């Protein structure tokens, strides 16, 4: 797997898993995910959105709050949650609730960082309360989804099918 | 099935690694149950069970006329599931590209700070 290759799969009935490698040591990646002044610079979503609010109280039981704004019409989207587990540079578990939740209940996000030879692998897992909630997320994005060719699809399947093996192989 | 029910069935069917591997195999061409069982060192009934789940989700179908009844991929449910994944992926790909740039900058800043320190106290 090359740095930059984003993997996105569903796992079990209630999870979405995202994996990505970064060409940086994990203490820097951890900072980029947990320090507001850094998070604000990249966690912006689709083009045309900014992040006017980013507050993070990084301790177990502490909360965080994110608000994004669409610059063209001023519409806002907010979310937040509470930290459940923090292992510096390694692991963060937090709850996640959107202000205008389009799925039932809160989700639980787990961020895991592992470093090998200066490359940090980030695994983000979102666990939803039910399969319906998880698939609701999937459906909400589908309406405006772009068509995908059959070939790309085969690639997607092939990569998710071998995801477990790649871990064992380790190098490439 | 409505498109919404079908998506539920699609993601449930995709949740299993063996079934994903079967689909990956079928993406490169149709295959009989026997051919599908071989690489997974599974019994035919075990493979048939997975095939039934995939069939129920509408992800695969069997060719009627041939005697060995090979299975093949059905495109539509995948396209629906994949469309979403693609959109979600795009948003995150954009976020992570910005993060790449930020990390590069952080590395440079760190290096500069280190050099400053080294200049002050040569090893």
Image (cartoon, rainbow, N blue to C red):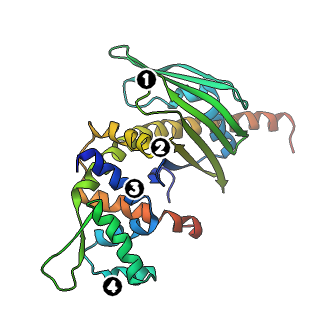
| Disc sitting over residue B34 in the figure | 4
Chain letter of mark 1 equals: A
| Disc sitting over residue A131 in the figure | none
Q: Are marks 1 and 4 in contact (CB under 8 Å)?
A: no
Secondary element under disc 3, as helix, strand or loop, is: helix
Whole-angstrom CA distance, mark 3 to mark 2, is 12 Å
**Quarter where residue A64 is shown:** top right
Residue placed under numbered mark 1 in the picture: A100
Most extreme residue toward the top, as rendered?
A74
Is disc 3 surrounded by few (<14), some (14 to 19) or many (20+) residues within 10 Å? Answer: many
Q: Are marks 3 and 2 on the same chain?
A: no
**Residue A115: image location, x then y, percent:** 66, 52
Residue placed under numbered mark 2 in the picture: A130
| Disc sitting over residue B12 in the figure | 3
**Residue B41: image location, x then y, percent:** 46, 83
**Residue A56: image location, x then y, percent:** 64, 25
Would you place residue B12 above or below residue B17 in this image?
above
**Quarter where residue A96 is shown:** top right
């Amino acid at each position: 797997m090359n740095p930059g290759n984003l993997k996105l799969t569903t796992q079990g009935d209630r999870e979405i898993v995202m994996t990505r490698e970064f060409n940086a040591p994990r203490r820097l990646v951890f900072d980029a995910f947990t320090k507001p002044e850094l998070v604000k610079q990249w966690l912006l979503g689709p083009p045309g959105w900014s992040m006017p609010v980013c507050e993070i109280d990084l301790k177990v039981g502490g909360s965080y709050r994110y608000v994004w704004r669409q610059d063209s019409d001023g519409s806002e989207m907010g979310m937040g949650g509470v930290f459940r587990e923090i292992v510096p540079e390694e692991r963060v578990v937090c709850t996640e609730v959107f202000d205008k939740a389009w799925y039932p209940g809160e989700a639980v996000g787990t961020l895991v960082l592992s470093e090998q030879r200066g490359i940090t692998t980030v695994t983000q897992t979102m666990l939803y309360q039910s399969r319906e909630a998880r698939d609701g997320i999937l459906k909400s994005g589908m309406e405006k989804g772009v068509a995908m060719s059959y070939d790309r699809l085969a690639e997607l399947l092939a990569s998710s099918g071998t995801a477990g093996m790649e871990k064992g192989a380790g190098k490439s | 099935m409505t498109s919404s029910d079908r998506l539920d069935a699609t993601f449930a069917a995709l949740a299993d690694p063996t079934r994903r591997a079967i689909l990956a195999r079928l993406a490169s061409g149709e295959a009989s149950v026997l051919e599908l069982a071989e690489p997974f060192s599974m019994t035919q009934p075990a493979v048939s069970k997975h095939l039934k789940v995939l069939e129920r989700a509408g992800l695969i179908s069997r060719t009627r006329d041939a005697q060995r009844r090979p299975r093949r991929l059905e495109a539509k449910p995948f396209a629906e599931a994949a469309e979403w994944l693609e959109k979600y992926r795009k948003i995150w790909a954009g976020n992570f590209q910005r993060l790449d740039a930020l990390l590069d900058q952080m590395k440079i800043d760190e290096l500069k700070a280190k050099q400053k320190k080294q200049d002050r106290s040569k090893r």
